[in-house]
Image (tube, rainbow, N blue to C red):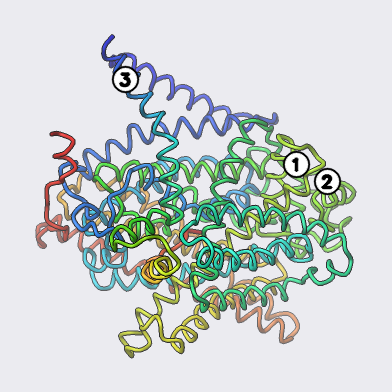
Amino acid sequence: MNSWNSKFQQLASGLKSCPAIFTAALREIFDESAYARFLARNRLSASRVSYAEFLREHEVAKVRRPRCC
Amino acid sequence: MPKSLRILIWLAVAVLGAFALATIALHRGERINAMWLVVAAFCTYALGYRFYSKFIAAKVLALDPQRATPAERLDNGRDFVPTNKWVVFGHHFAAIAGPGPLVGPVLAAQFGYLPGTLWILAGAVLGGCVQDFVILLFSVRRDGKSLTEMAREEVGRLGGLVAYVAIISIIVILLGVAALIVVNALKNSPWGAFTIAMTIPIALFMGLYLRRLRPGKVLETSVLGFILVMLAIWGGQWASQTPRVAGWFTLTAPTLALLIIIYGFAASALPVWLLLAPRDYLSTFVKLGTIALLALGIIALHPTLHMPPLTRFIDGSGPVFAGNIFPFAFITIACGAISGFHSLISSGTTPKLIRRETETRMVGYGAMMAESMVAIMAMIAACVLQPGTYFAINSPAGIVGQAPETAAATISSWGFPITATEMHSLAQAVGEQTLYNRTGGAPAFAVGMAHIFSNSLGGQAVMAIWYHFAIMFEALFILTVLDAGTRVGRFMVQDALTHVWKPLGRTSWYPSILATSALIVGAWGYFLWQGVKDPLGGINSLWPLFGISNQLLATVALCVATTIIVKMGKARYTAVTLTPLLWLVAVTFTASWHKMFDPNPRIGFLAHARQLAMGAATAANSRLIFNDRLDAFVTGVLIFMVALILIESAFLWLSVLSGRKQAGVKETAFVPSGFAAEEQG
């Protein structure tokens, strides 16, 4: 019975974290997380200048990333 | 959960899957519901993932949860970032899902729904998923090295060279055929051309908005871009109904081809943030949304398939493309079953994000299953159409005739009744002048998708909006592949040219950018132009060429994977990669042989050239003859290169197995994972 309860709790917590994971996936796909990491790594705040800097750094990785057929 | 209950559940899944497969395989003369395909697919994927991928993970690859991945060891917050497995899954899926799994199944539907469906399921579970999974893991164990680097290090210098040539070739042929699909979908369609033209200023606006107004707010910008694209679709209706504007956007195939070539060159040379990046975001946003919507639409409508399981065209006389079911069904559907291109993604960004080695199974094997499901949905979208409609859209004028009545009569004579009036009504319903001779798969898929969407939401009144939404979705998707692919190709050429003269390798030096962009655009532009001028619609020659090159790249990837497995001392498990490898060798070599030497002029390039040579000696004929010979030459070179890597790999396997060569893989040394320690402690 305990094992069923723990499975149920695991499932419930898994379902609860679904929206957060979904948002995180979207943020990763759309490079928002990469920008956040860039800001944290360089101790910068979000601004036009820092975004332009991020784009420069990110450009090489972005253009070398193939998109499948 | 008790073991007995687990066994019962998996037995039930197996029985249900077998029953669904038997239903789709054995029903004759009776229409079946599309849900049988969905159920068969889900059960097959579930069994494949639970048992086969687990076997590969445990026995062949021996995934080690204690071993640190490059994302953990080299974490720099930029290229190497340990990321949640579901996030990596989404990222990987967004990168591998392209127009291929939508177009290939639609074209292969000319054989009926059965061959394509069985190939998608078996090819994915036993081939495509395995390839993506093993290449991802091997790249993870080599600090995220690319396929070319792994081929060079594990197989030999020749292997590296072949991988490089195969990648460049597939990029060029893919971009040529992808552009041709867009041309065929947009020619003489002011609504479609207007909508797609509008996506360029929309992307430019998004680029400026993102850089100047809301830096870093990519999701918000993508939502805004999507709203603008929807307005463009709505505006397209106005454009098509306003004679003067419609005149500007009613473009012939050659004009569209030239415009796309100019666009490809500009997109490759313009700053990334201005056009490429925002288009990529917009396309990804639309892609993920539409795929989800299509899945919901199919489940909500659970439509009936009107296409029979097998058509008379399994004999090779198909109007969409010529060639027997073997090998042509298997090269027509590449993405969705097994696609060599995926090995580039699996050895690109994804391995640098994997947090734990054990997660490669879900990301590599699992994401390919999701892509395969997209291919099943495309097959359903094509097969819900009446077969007469499907063939009227997909058959070139050179086969069925130019006049609507002639085309309808020809198609009806094949046993797929259709009238010119029905086709005219359908064209009117989707807001087009005509739907005849729209080869390439995209328009047929769009009609099928519009059928599913409009029956689930909005009814016939919005059929035209849904059709143009689907066309926009595919064209946007393809044009993004086009500009991203041109850039990737350009970088690869620059990487190679740097050995000739260093400045040519500088990615910021404009003369080099312009020269290499022109080289890549010129190469795929040539194939596009050839397709546009082909009286048989171009798809007949170019799609098989693309399928062959894509599968040949998969052959290279599986050669590398088999070599590594042999060198790991796991030769007894080589069947896991050797079986799909041998199958692909059989398929691609047979298909290449047919495409080069088949005496039927509709199949063999050289036979077609000979047939043309017997006709009038016009300039147009001479060009077509040259194109046929060029296609045969390209096919021959690809096959020769892959034969070289096969021979080199086979010698290596034999040397290792006979003890003449010491086995040993070039993996990064083991470092214990901190994540594993965290979980245990």
Residue at the image point whose x is 34% and y is 71% from the top: B162
Which residue was labeled with disc 2?
A: B418
Q: Residue B170 location, x and y as percent?
A: 47, 67
Identify which amino acid the numbered label 2 is placed on: Ile
- Dot 3: what SS? helix
Asked if labels 1 and 2 share a chain, the reply is yes
Q: Are marks 3 and 1 in contact (CB under 8 Å)?
A: no
Identify which amino acid the numbered label 3 is placed on: Lys
**Left or right of residue B54, residue B289 in this image:** right
Asked if labels 3 and 1 share a chain, the reply is no
* Residues packed near mark 1 inside 10 Å, few (<14), some (14 to 19) or many (20 plus): some
Which residue was labeled with disc 3?
A: A7
Asked if labels 3 and 2 share a chain, the reply is no
Q: Chain of mark 1?
A: B
Label 1 to label 2, Cα distance in Å?
A: 9 Å
Which residue was labeled with disc 1?
A: B386
The answer to which of marks 1 and 2 sits earlier in the sequence is 1
In which quarter of the view is residue B564 placed?
bottom left
Residue at the image point whose x is 50% and y is 78% from the top: B520
Q: Is any part of residue B65 visible from this angle?
A: yes
